Amino acid sequence: MKHALILAAGLGERMRPLTDTTPKPLLEVHGKPLIVHHIEKLAAAGVNYIAINTSHLADQFPDVLGDGSRWGVRLRYSYEGPTPLETGGGMLKALPLLGNDPFIVVSADIWSDIDYAALPWQPAGVAHLVMVPNPDFHPKGDFALLDGQLYDEDAPAPAERLTFGNVGIYRPEIVAGEAPGKFKLAPMYRRAIAQRKLSGERYDGFWRNVGNAAQLEALRGEVG
């Protein structure tokens, strides 16, 4: 049985005014909400249970997506209140919906051809991240990758610095011991890197960030 978390609690501030009335993950690309792209891919990868964290205009998610039965999955919603809890806080709050085994986490505001089924669902460390070539808007990347291991500033040559593609497999313990509330995952990544418990892989296929209206329109012109 596989579980997933789709991160969908952002305020969508860079997508305004489109997100004044619609959460960013429910904005459509050729008649289909962005988040449905992920639900379909997760279902095809054998995921049975999907948690969706929500905040901004949260009531619209169950209204549009229902319980997931149309995709053969079970959807559950983790409401964070009017202020999103960031990636780490959102994951911690959703853990009761995700079970004790490793689970996949996907940000709702990307679009890619990543094969979720091909990812290592039993990572050697606390997480395994999909890394992509640095896009124009993030030229310095996030972490360096060498032989399947992620590094930060202490990366050995010839490690290549890449950008986190917002898709990863996580063990629940990555946020174990953290206090409930608002916090990012970045410190957890760096802690895992220091312990050599964060693996990764490079993905060179189709991947797009959908952070603003221009990126959304560009995506609509690229996919059918």
Image (cartoon, rainbow, N blue to C red):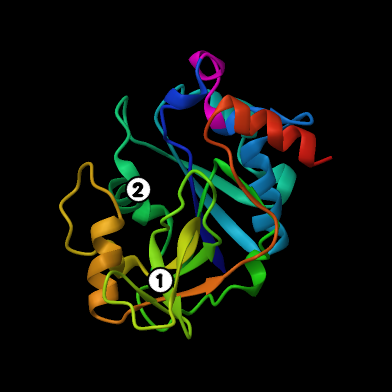
Q: Quadrant of the C terminus?
A: top right
| Residue occupied by mark 1 | 144
Percent coordinates x, y for residue 49 in the rendering: 56, 56
Crowding at label 2, few (<14), some or many (≥20) Cα neighbours within 10 Å?
Answer: many
Can you identify the residue that label 2 sits on?
87
Q: On screen, 29 above or below 123? A: above
Residue 149 in picture, x, y percent from top left? 41, 81
Cα separation between marks 1 and 2:
21 Å
User: Residue sitting at 65 percent across and 48 percent down?
Assistant: 39
Residue type, label 2: Thr
Q: Nearer the viewer, residue 47 or 25?
A: 25
Q: Is residue 148 left or right of residue 223?
A: left
Which quadrant of the figure has residue 31? top right
Quarter assignment of residue 161: bottom left
Secondary-structure class at tag 2:
helix
Image coordinates of residue 113 in percent, x first then y, are 70, 57
* Chain part drawn in magenta: 17-24
